[in-house]
Image (cartoon, rainbow, N blue to C red):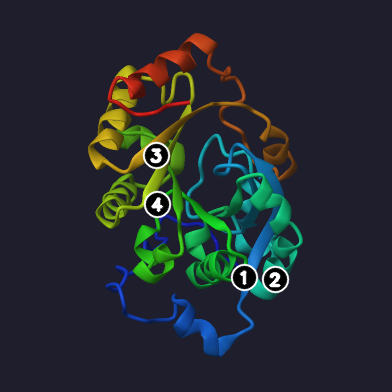
Amino acid sequence: MAVLLSPEFPVGRPARACGDEDASTLAGAATRRPIVGSVHSWDLSTGVDGPGTRFVTFLSGCPLTCSYCHNPDTWRMRNGRRTTADDVVAEAAKYTTFIRAAGGGATVSGGEPLLQPVFAGELLHRYKHELGLHTALDTSGFLGTRATDALLRDVDLVLLDIKSWDRDTYKKVTGRPLQPTLDFARRLADLGKDVHVRFVLVPDLTDDPANIEGVASFAASLGNVSRVDVLPFHKLGEGKWQALGMDFSLHGTPSPTAGQVAAAREAFTAHGLYAV
């Protein structure tokens, strides 16, 4: 059944403590193999989905409706292909020698991968333990309660999108509340997980200095953020919005200038963070 977006989309139940097993752990899911998920695509990527060259699996389905999303075709699970974890891992295995030589790994992205926690957890576990790859989870954190401690043990790096510090702006950008992302970020800090924060700089939307300062101060307070990516807004995905018959509300918004991007990065570095 397709997952449709609605304001009532559940955040999910809190994850169980480390050591517990349920349907979202590898052990709990093993009796129901082959594990199947909705996959949008996979690709080899360098520089934007974690360190080195990476095999990136894009899962379908997302509870957020970000106004600058460049892949709105990933929002609904029904738009993906039903694919087994065996098939995805077999595809990744073709590139492991090259990936290791390039200092890379495997990233599970989306959409929002935690919308499919059993499938995402299976991929992460097998990428790490079967293929011996560095693993990364690319997430908004909104569904962080769906990530069990068992899943997170198989994650070497979390790419965490913090869209805004101002709550009203966050709701305007994503259609969802900010608090679940902050709660997940603090949980990752408690677990000592390596985190790269991603912040998209959108003129007249997320570029208010107080908003940037808020994200920077919060990220610095966590103690486990090793990098901040300040990503300039672009309109490369606008054609997808049009093809889907959707209104791209940021059509008239320009990309930030080099000076604006540099100023945002300086706000993060002023807090002792490494920002690029």
Question: Distance from label 3 to label 4 (Cα)?
Answer: 8 Å
271 above or below 184?
Answer: above
**Secondary element at image label 4:** loop
For label 2, the residue is: 83
For label 3, the residue is: 162
Q: Is residue 214 left or right of residue 10?
A: left
Q: Earlier in the sequence, mark 2 or mark 3?
A: 2
Q: Position of residue 93 (x, y in %)?
A: 71, 64
Which numbered disc covers residue 37?
A: 1
Q: Position of residue 172 (x, y in %)?
A: 41, 36
Q: Earlier in the sequence, mark 3 or mark 4?
A: 4
Report if the CB atoms under discs 2 and 1 are less than 8 Å apart: yes
Q: Earlier in the sequence, mark 2 or mark 4?
A: 2
Question: Distance from label 2 to label 4 (Cα)?
Answer: 24 Å
**Secondary element at image label 3:** loop
Q: Residues within 10 Å of mark 1 (few under 14, many from 20)?
A: many
180 above or below 200?
Answer: below
Question: Distance from label 1 to label 3 (Cα)?
Answer: 26 Å
Residue type beneath disc 2: Thr
Residue type beneath disc 3: Ile
Q: Is residue 79 left or right of residue 69?
A: right
Report if the CB atoms under discs 3 and 4 are less than 8 Å apart: yes
**Secondary element at image label 2:** strand
Q: Position of residue 250 (x, y in %)?
A: 57, 27
Q: Nearer the viewer, residue 134 or 4?
A: 134
Residue at the spot 64% in from the left edge and 28% down from the top edge: 235
Q: Residues within 10 Å of mark 3 (few under 14, many from 20)?
A: many
Question: Distance from label 2 to label 3 (Cα)?
Answer: 29 Å
For label 4, the residue is: 141
Residue at the spot 53% in from the left edge and 12% down from the top edge: 258
